[in-house]
Image: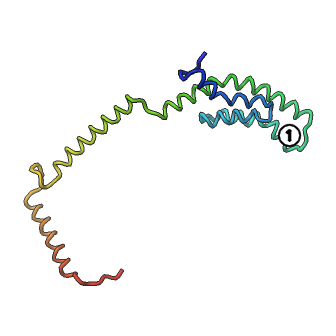
Amino acid sequence: MNVTDRGKTWEITNSIFVVLTFFLGFANWTSFLYCALLVKCKKWAYYALLYALPLIITVIIGKFTTLTFWGIIISGIISIVHIFKIREEVLIRYDRLLKSKYLDNADINKLINETRTNSENVSNKKQYLHPEKENTTLTQQSKSMISNEENHIKEDEKENKGRIIDF
């Protein structure tokens, strides 16, 4: 039975993390860490740490005791059952994550239309801001102020022509 609408082949290829749990304690925690990183879910990172504890304790102690052996075996068996329980949830979350990264054609067309509408509104507003258009609100007084400023700038340029400016 398919969990997602992507098909059985996609689900099998994206369930390859299940294989790592069959290494009973030595790599079973990596499958939970992979799931946590794949779908950005912290709880599976905590499970990865939990399933890695017997291996970490064995490395810290420095020898392989009966207690650490049974800890690794039991955590390995539990992790196999656990990974099959979370497999469907991982696939569903991963499918949703992939779908949210890409826009479908309807969303793309909607964004294009919104952009066109916004650009038309902006171009209509800009049209009224140009002084050469008839719909301007500049008065004769403000036009004369602008021309006076332009004249002052031109006079300053003539006076400063040929000067060397040190910075």
- Count of labels in the image: 1
Determine which quarter of the picture holds residue 46.
Answer: top right
The x, y position of residue 89, in whole percent, is 61, 25
The x, y position of residue 118, in whole percent, is 28, 40
Most distant residue in the front direction: 9
Quadrant containing the N terminus is: top right
Q: How is the image coloured?
A: rainbow
Towards the viewer: 109 or 121:
109
The residue tagged with tag 1: helix, strand or loop? helix
Most distant residue in the left direction: 140
Q: In this view, does 46 lie to the left or right of 76?
A: left
Amino acid on which the number 1 mark rests in the picture: Thr
Quadrant containing the C terminus is: bottom left
Q: In this view, does 160 lie to the left or right of 36?
A: left
Q: Looking at the image, which residue is at 9% across and 50% down?
A: 134
Above or below, 101 relative to 12: below
Most distant residue in the top direction: 1
Mark 1 neighbour density, 10 Å: few (under 14) some (14–19) many (20 or more) = some
Most distant residue in the bottom direction: 163
Above or below, 155 relative to 5: below
Determine which quarter of the picture holds residue 32.
Answer: top right
Q: Looking at the image, which residue is at 79% across and 25% down?
A: 77
The x, y position of residue 53, in whole percent, is 79, 37
Q: Is residue 3 left or right of residue 132?
A: right
Above or below, 145 relative to 34: below
Q: Looking at the image, which residue is at 52% across and 32% down?
A: 98
The x, y position of residue 130, in whole percent, is 16, 53
Can you identify the residue that label 1 sits on?
Answer: 58
Q: Looking at the image, which residue is at 24% across and 84% down?
A: 162
